[in-house]
Amino acid sequence: MAHQIPSDGTLLPLMEEFYTIQGEGFNTGKAAYFIRLGGCDVGCHWCDVKESWDAELHPLTSADDIVAKAETFPGKAVVITGGEPLIYNLDYLTAKLQQKKILTFIETSGAYPLSGSWDWICLSPKKFKAPRPDITPYANELKVIIFNKSDFKWAEQYAQTVSDNCKLYLQPEWSKSKEITPLIIDYVMANPKWEISLQTHKYLNIP
Ligand SMILES: C[S@@+](CC[C@H](N)C(=O)[O-])C[C@H]1O[C@@H](n2cnc3c(N)ncnc32)[C@H](O)[C@@H]1O
Ligand SMILES: Nc1nc2[nH]cc(C(=O)O)c2c(=O)[nH]1
Ligand code: SF4
Ligand SMILES: [Mg+2]
């Protein structure tokens, strides 16, 4: 039986939730509660959470229960990720979190309409299913995954579409990081509007 997911955002397919350190991008190093929603059809061949793709495998969970758990941790920021979290209406979940004075951060490919109220939007665009053009101006951070040399040019094209104060990051695709990280280092030194982002949680062996 397919999930009947209510459009009001009160029930969401929850894959996992965990308290850790944000490992990537602008908020690297900050304690945060991660909420990973199931479901994604973007199809990145190098995706590091393919188990998230099938929403049916992840139980529909009450947003109120998610918020109640998030509240019990000392870190007052949540990262909503997936899967692709913007498949779902996130207005209800983010409003409840912000009512509890918890900061709301999202990790998104931007391939679905923007919902929710956000303290920080990390947009990580994908070649496999482009972000909606109406989302790019709202990104606080553009984090482009570099898998091969041609991705630098592609990253520059996206940098044109974000706001002037959007932070720009290049992050090596994990399986290619040995070859790609030195290229990113050279690129950032030559083009310092960009910064390097590493998946520090993988080096630290934490979730
Ligand atoms: C798993 S995705 C989930 C959120 C959303 N679907 C997205 O892609 O932004 C979380 C972050 O991990 C990045 N990511 C996924 N697989 C990766 C890999 N193999 N190497 C480096 N970054 C990766 C994504 O680009 C995204 O910034
Ligand atoms: N520590 C940690 N930081 C992260 N930043 C983005 C992640 C994600 O999978 O969305 C992630 C993750 O899975 N773990
Ligand atoms: S958009 Fe995100 S979750 Fe979906 S396949 Fe790509 S990296 Fe994985
Ligand atoms: Mg991850």
Image (cartoon, rainbow, N blue to C red):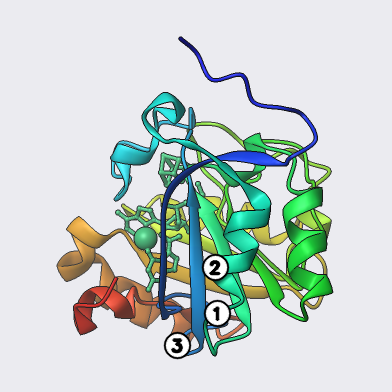
Amino acid at dot 2: Lys
Label 1 close to label 2 by CB (< 8 Å): yes
Q: Residue 18's spot in the image, x, y percent?
A: 40, 68
Compared with 159, 28 (above or below) is below
Q: CA distance from mark 1 to mark 3?
A: 42 Å
Towards the viewer: 149 or 119:
119
Q: How many marks?
A: 3
In this view, 98 is above or below 61: below
Q: Which residue is mark 1?
A: 72
- Quadrant where the image shows the N terminus: top left
Identify the mark nearer the N-term, 1 or 3: 1
Q: Residue at x 48, y 27 (%)?
A: 41
Mark 3, residue position: 189
Q: Please state, as top left, top right, bottom left or bottom right, where the C terminus lies in the image.
A: bottom left
Which three-letter amino acid code belongs to the residue tagged 1? Thr
Q: Describe the element under mark 3 as helix, strand or loop.
A: helix
Image x and y of residue 80, in percent: 58, 59
In this rendering, the label closer to the viewer, 1 or 3: 1
What crowding class fits label 2: few (fewer than 14 Cα within 10 Å), some (14-19), or many (20 or more)?
A: few
For mark 2, what is the residue? 69
Q: Amino acid at mark 3?
A: Met
Residue 2 visible in the current orientation: yes
Which residue is at the far top?
A: 1
At mark 2, the secondary structure is helix
